[in-house]
Amino acid sequence: MRAAPSLVYNWNIDHLPVTENLKHLESEHDDDDDDDDDDDDDGDDNAKLNKLFGGRRINRQVWYKGDGIRFGRYDRHKPYIMFYNHFNFEIEYHEHVPGQYRVVGAAVTPESKNYTTQESAAKCSAPKSPISFPAGRPQNAQSINITYSYSVKWIKSDVRWASRWDKYLALRGSRIRWKPLITLIVVSTSTILCAVLSEIAFCFVLQEVTKIQQAKSNPNTITSGLKSLKEVALRSPKNTLLLSVLVGNGCHLFVLALLTIVFAAIGVLSPEKRGSIATMAIYTYSFTSIIAGYTAAYCFRAYKGEDFVQDEDENEETIIKTDLTLWSTLFLLTPVLIPGLVFATFLVLNLVIVVRGSDGAVPFPAILKLTGLWFFVSIPLSLLGSLIGKKRPMNGYKKLVFKSNSPAPEIPKLPFLLKPITRTMLAGLLPFTAVAAELALIANSLWLNQVFFMFGFLMATYIILVLGSVVITIGTVYLMLLAGDYRWQWSSFILSGSPAIYVFLSCLSLLIFRYSYNGLTAILLYVSYSFLLSAAIFFITGSIGFLSTWAFVHYIYSSVRND
């Protein structure tokens, strides 16, 4: 026999995941051992357990499996599937103080019992013959009534409340030791590729800067390429206000994610303390909101506060000069636009959970606390950051911004690889490989109640994701400028954020091929929160990519003298 790999139950008791007791597997395997000629020479009990798990090595002392309880068992030597319908729960408790008890562990032993009468079902007693179904796809589908039953056994334990998660962390460590290695290989490969791309891009930049410096004495030597696009490439982009708001919020999320992962990696935050990571993230987000306001105001002021709008009567762009209304809009949208959309989505989803009668809904007092942190901490700090960013010197960036007094030149026909859709999809592919391995573990932690504790690898993949997005974006923007496409501001933001597209698609693939949620509410929650996670990655990588590309373009054109 071996475990069915796809369908599992995932249960929680007092916020602890229920593990499957493996001791019953040895006796079941011994009953079938006479029918398995391949196992006659294998007398090692540990090898038998290894065979039960499809070749995975299971330590003799590890008698529990923490990734869900299977629906049944499949015997490859017999043409039927045994279905589990009885569950023996063993709940461990510890006496904290006299008269007060805490749950410190939970395990279950599944069984298959073919109840023939209501009396046998009421007493949970049945013949040894299990419930079985023919293996393979049924020819004539028909409904079958199955009676479920369970028993509960309370076991006093010496495990303290503070150590209740040790067993679960040991389980994960014994099962996924190959996954960190795979992640390390992916991260190392991505690092090497990023280093190679960085070296190639740096060589091209040095060649171009050398040509530009040589052309200072004879400007006619360069009549095309980067120099010819200097004026139009350094103009303020369309919708500068919106771009500044998005970049500010993206930098804010970047710092939030970095601090949270660092604190978790060094042990300040731990999955043993349920909710500690979420609580830390909420307070960190509120008290670091000054970053969003500062970055947004700095970017907006660097482009001289100009914003492009489309004229309703004419097919041309009109420049809106900086005024009090425009700056007030920036100050307001930075702490309200993105957080407001996320908070509104959260309220709608929480309302759906309340209507469905689930106990997983966030209580109303907690929502009031979140609202208070937003209005009385986050928004004021963001306004303070905007005021500081508005008054900070530009360090030369503002001098390189040209006013759009002449019409922009027509963009030549771009190669296929540099077309907007093609370059966006290609730019996000390589950075996504650095986060793909960890994404599956994070998804299991969120949706299958599994423990995730490899924050060191998560921090490495997070850094590689951002660096990979930056390097690829700079290289792509450089090729765009050489091809005559000067629209690098929004392009750099979208190119850097493109790994989020693959993240969302991978979440959808997990929903379709692995999780198999049936209820509309569960699907809505999964898709909504997956979209919010992907959007956060988009803003993080997009903002860092934009700022890095901005510095790159500034470095290039700071060597070009105005004619």
Image: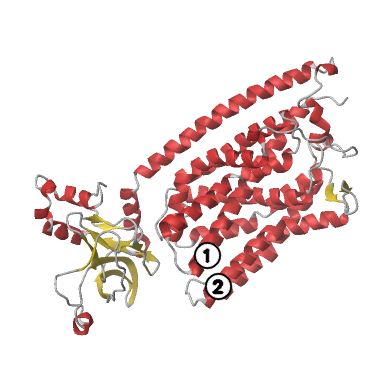
Asked if marks 2 and 1 touch (Cβ < 8 Å), the reply is yes
Q: Percent x, y for residue 322?
A: 87, 50
The answer, for residue 271, to whether it is visible in the render is no
Amino acid type of the residue that numbered disc 1 sits on in the rendered structure: Leu
The answer to which of 312 and 188 lies nearer the viewer is 312
The answer to which of 417 and 42 lies nearer the viewer is 417
Q: Percent x, y for residue 145?
A: 29, 76
- Residue lying at 53% horizontally and 60% vertically, measured from the top left: 527
Residue at numbered disc 2 = 352
- Residue lying at 68% horizontally and 60% vertically, measured from the top left: 378
Residue at numbered disc 1 = 525
Assess disc 1: are there few (<14), some (14-19) or many (≥20) residues with their C-alpha within 10 Å of its C-alpha.
Answer: some
Q: Percent x, y for residue 477?
A: 68, 34
Amino acid type of the residue that numbered disc 2 sits on in the rendered structure: Val
Which of the 4 image quadrants contains residue 4? bottom left
In this rendering, position of residue 548 left or right of residue 169: right
**Label 1: which secondary element:** helix
